[in-house]
Every structure is written in C-alpha cells, then in structure tokens.
C-alpha cells in the first residue's frame, strides 16, 4: 500500500487496484467475468498478510473460499484447506489422536494398536486402504483411484526411552516413548486424510497415505517398498517435527538434507589366552585410530562422522578379558563417502588388532539394518513443497534449513522416486518444547498439528493439480 501512495505517476493504477480488490472482497459473485482477476488479487492480498492470523474470521477468507473449484489454483484453495484444518472440532480431534498414540507407544514392527487406531479413523472417514503392508503398515488412498499417484508418508514407531515429562498423556508403557514425534506424524497424516476426503472432488488423481512401521529400527521403509507401497507412485513427501523451528514454521532445503548412515560393531578377541595379549589395549588403540579417518582422510569441507558410542570389556578387576566389543555409527553426505568410511573402519580395526596380536571381526548389520543412503531432496519436489507451503502459511513461515548429520529411512523412497523431506517446527519456549528428538524430555507444541495436516494436504492436492496442468499442456502441443 505504501509504495502505491508514494509513486504518484501510478496513482491511477492504485485507484484501479483498490476498486478491483474492494469489489472482489465485498461482492465476489458479481465479478464472474473477472474471476481470475479476483484470484490474482486474492494471492496479492494473502502475500501481504499471515493467513493464520488475519483470515480466521474475516470476510476476505470467506471471499477467497467462495465458489472456487480450484481448476485454477489460487490462494482461495490453500485457504480452504487451512480453514478445514483449523475448524475447532478438527483441532480437538487431531490433538486427541496424537495423545492416544502418545500414551501407548509401540516399538518397531510392534505398532499393532497404533495401526488399529489409524484403521479405525480411516474407516470413520470412509477411506479405503490396504493392510497389512510391512506387518503393521497401511496404504490408504483418497481421490479418483486413477493416476497420477502422489504419496505422503508418516512413521508410526516409538523409541525404547523412558519418558520423564510429567503430563496428563504421559506414556503408559514403561521404557517406551514417542520421543521422536512419530505420534504427531501419524496424527498429521490422518488430519491430511480428513482434509483431502473433504476435498475429494477437487483431486485430479490419487493421494496415497502411507503409515509406515519401524523407522527407528528395522528398515520399515524398505519393507514398505518391497511390499508395493509406492507402486505406480510418481512422487513422495514426508514431514518431521523439529525442535529447532518455531511452532508451525516449515523448513527444508534443496539437495542434501540428512546424512547417509551406517552402524558397526567390532569384536576384538585374544586367541592366545595370555595376559601379554590384551584386547582392552587393542580396542583402545583401534578407537583412537578410528578418529583419524575423518580428521586426516576426509575432505574438511565435506562433513563426515565416525563415532564410537559403546565399549564393553566386562567388569573384572584382576584379569585381562579375552574379548572386547565396541561399536558406533558413521555418517556422510554421499554414498561414495559412506562406503569409503565403511571400508576404512574395517581396515583400521582389523589392522590394529593385528598390531597387538589379537583378531577382530566387524559387523555392519547389513542383514538387519541396512546402510542408509543420504537424504537428498529432489530439487523440483523441494520447490513444490516451498511453493505450496508459502501459499498456505506465508513466506514468513517458511525457512531454508541447513543439512544435519541425522538420518532417516525415508531416504529409501527417495532412491526410487522423486522425493522431498521437510520439517515442521514444534518449538515453544513457554511450553518447554525445545528438547531434541530422542531426549526423555522431548515434547511438542500441539498447535503445529493442524498446520502440519494442512501442509500435507496442500502439497498433495496441489501436486495433482499442477501435474494435471502439465499433462494438459503436453496434450495441447
Ligand atoms: Zn528418531
Ligand atoms: Zn523420527
């Protein structure tokens, strides 16, 4: 508004804009011939304001939502999605879903009650699904049942951690906790299912909703893929809560986002059974030598990690043990570097064992926990997330984030089809939701839930919309 007042040569344009915007806002039904014009100005109005704050009860929202079939995407479509998510009864429902799951955390491939709860909610919404997929997983679908297919994924498993947060819905399963926010992920995906079902007539294809087991352990994503979860699906998206971003803020980046990751366990043994052959000294030397791989061999501009996280030689005080075990994790941002780290870890441990006259074996758990490739966001899919999110919650609520050394099994989907992974903030200093994932103090700000549900729905619906436009354009050539 300021710029229009200041630039006098364009004064007549500003008057024209004001007339058009005012007319659109006051009586949109009378602007039938300039529908697209109103949509355009709808976008302009929205880009100047925070939709969450400004459009809750106002006439602008009502205008934007009126009579739009979303054959041409406008802010009205995004606002309609947000409006459904923010209905009082839906907010109440999504929080209750998350709390029920939080109270009953289940570990990898044991998510029986969580899966049952999801299926019950899908039945309530009259959404069809395939079950079981990967033991407890579910593949639900909303839309035409026809291509194109786009998928959204939520993980369902909890962690073997004792919750220390004292609140009404604290974990009722001793030693188990949703300390990574997967309870919120399931609730937000169900929230998206509800929104998409309500907007079924707008969908120009099919949204596949994947409720996946065993992200924390057991390669649930791999098994979902093996059992056909992403058959015919051409793109996939997933969201993770983040204690680093303020509540409701969406963050992502193009390219590498999360590290590739592997685990190792070494066993050092003394064959000689003599005190002069010492597996403890051998293991100590090996642990020290492992530190040199990253500090002396890796490119300092290319982040890599080798960490020994446990060492066990028993608890005897007056004898040299025959065996020492130790292990840890290694991470890097390319498959080449991940494989190089794996090779060097084995070489260093075996060579050090030889120096000290012991023998060593190194297990990389290839049969049970595969080595995770790095999570590299497809540029087009990232741009899609960014566009849909900014349209939904405003550019002030979208952040480009830095890569982190964490790992995710969502990366297995990204090896098969174009994919983008993004975060939703749950940080609220007043509530105390600022602890990192996998902390026994972990908690979330539940106000993020409806925004997450709307973000999922907007990304999926708009993907199908944009895809439809590109197909139509292709046919017209
Ligand atoms: Zn986790
Ligand atoms: Zn997680």
Image (cartoon, rainbow, N blue to C red):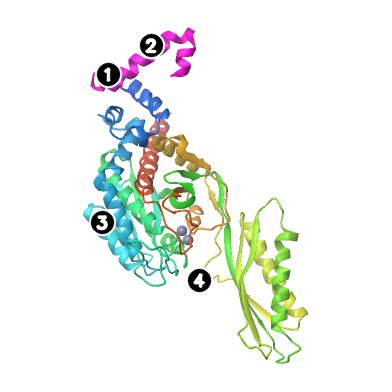
Secondary structure state at the residue bearing disc 3: helix
Residue pointed to by mark 1: 31
Query: Which one is in front in this view, the residue at disc 4 or the one at disc 3?
Result: 3
Whether tag 1 and tag 4 are in contact, CB under 8 A, the answer is: no
Compute the Cα span from label 1 to label 3. Answer: 41 Å
Secondary structure state at the residue bearing disc 1: helix
Q: Which residues are magenta?
A: 1-30
Q: Is residue 422 magenta?
A: no
Compute the Cα span from label 4 to label 3. Answer: 32 Å
Q: Residues within 10 Å of mark 4 (few under 14, many from 20)?
A: few
Residue pointed to by mark 3: 121
Sequence-wise first label, 4 or 3: 3
Secondary structure state at the residue bearing disc 2: helix
Compute the Cα span from label 4 to label 2. Answer: 68 Å
Residue pointed to by mark 4: 368
Q: Which mark is on residue 15?
A: 2
Sequence-wise first label, 1 or 4: 1
Residue 346 location, x and y as percent? 67, 71
Residue 230 location, x and y as percent? 41, 54
Name the residue nearer the viewer: 41 or 469.
41
Residue 468 in the figure: left or right of residue 194? right
Q: Residues within 10 Å of mark 3 (few under 14, many from 20)?
A: some
Sequence-wise first label, 1 or 2: 2
Residue at left 48%, top 52%? 243
Q: Main secondary structure of the magenta part?
A: helix
């Amino acid at each position: 508004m300021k710029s229009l007042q200041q630039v006098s040569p364009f004064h007549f344009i500003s008057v024209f804009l004001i007339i058009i915007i005012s007319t659109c806002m006051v009586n949109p039904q009378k602007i039938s011939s300039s529908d697209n014009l109103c949509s355009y100005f709808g976008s302009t109005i929205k880009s100047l304001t925070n939709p969450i704050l400004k459009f809750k009860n106002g006439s602008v929202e009502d205008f934007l939502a009126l009579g739009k079939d979303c054959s041409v995407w406008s802010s009205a479509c995004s606002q309609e999605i947000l409006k459904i998510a923010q209905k009082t009864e839906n907010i109440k429902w999504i929080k209750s879903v998350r709390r029920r799951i939080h109270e009953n955390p289940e570990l990898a491939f044991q998510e029986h009650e969580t899966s049952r709860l999801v299926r019950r909610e899908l039945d309530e919404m009259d959404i069809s699904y395939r079950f079981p997929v990967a033991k407890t997983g579910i593949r639900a679908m909303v839309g035409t049942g026809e291509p194109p297919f786009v998928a959204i994924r939520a993980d369902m498993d909890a962690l073997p951690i004792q919750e220390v947060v004292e609140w009404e819905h604290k974990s009722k399963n001793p030693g188990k906790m949703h300390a990574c926010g997967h309870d919120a992920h399931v609730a937000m995906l169900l929230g998206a299912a509800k929104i998409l079902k309500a907007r079924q007539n707008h969908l120009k294809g099919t949204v596949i909703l994947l409720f996946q087991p065993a992200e924390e352990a057991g390669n649930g994503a791999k098994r979902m893929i093996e059992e056909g979860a992403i058959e015919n699906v051409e793109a996939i998206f997933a969201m993770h809560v983040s204690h680093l971003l303020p509540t409701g803020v969406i963050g992502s980046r193009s390219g590498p986002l999360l590290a590739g990751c592997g685990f190792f366990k070494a066993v050092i043994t003394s064959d000689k059974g003599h005190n002069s052959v010492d597996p403890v000294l051998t293991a100590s030397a090996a642990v020290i030598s492992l530190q040199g791989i990253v500090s002396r061999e890796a490119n300092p501009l290319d982040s890599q990690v080798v960490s020994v996280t446990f060492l066990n030689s028993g608890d005897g005080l007056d004898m040299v043990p025959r065996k020492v075990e130790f292990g840890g994790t290694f991470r890097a941002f390319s498959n080449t570097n991940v494989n190089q780290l794996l090779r060097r870890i084995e070489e260093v441990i075996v060579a050090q064992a030889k120096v000290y006259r012991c023998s060593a074996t190194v297990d990389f758990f290839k049969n049970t926990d595969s080595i995770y490739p790095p999570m590299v966001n497809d540029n087009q899919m990232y741009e899609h997330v960014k566009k849909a999110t900014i349209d939904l919650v405003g550019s002030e609520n979208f952040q480009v984030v830095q890569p982190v050394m964490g790992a995710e099994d969502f990366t297995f989907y990204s090896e098969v089809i174009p994919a983008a992974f993004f975060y939703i903030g749950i940080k609220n200093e007043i509530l105390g939701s600022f602890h990192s994932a996998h902390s026994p103090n972990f908690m979330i700000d539940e106000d993020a839930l409806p925004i997450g549900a709307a973000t999922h729905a907007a990304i999926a619906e708009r993907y199908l919309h944009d895809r439809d436009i590109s197909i139509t354009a292709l046919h017209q050539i």
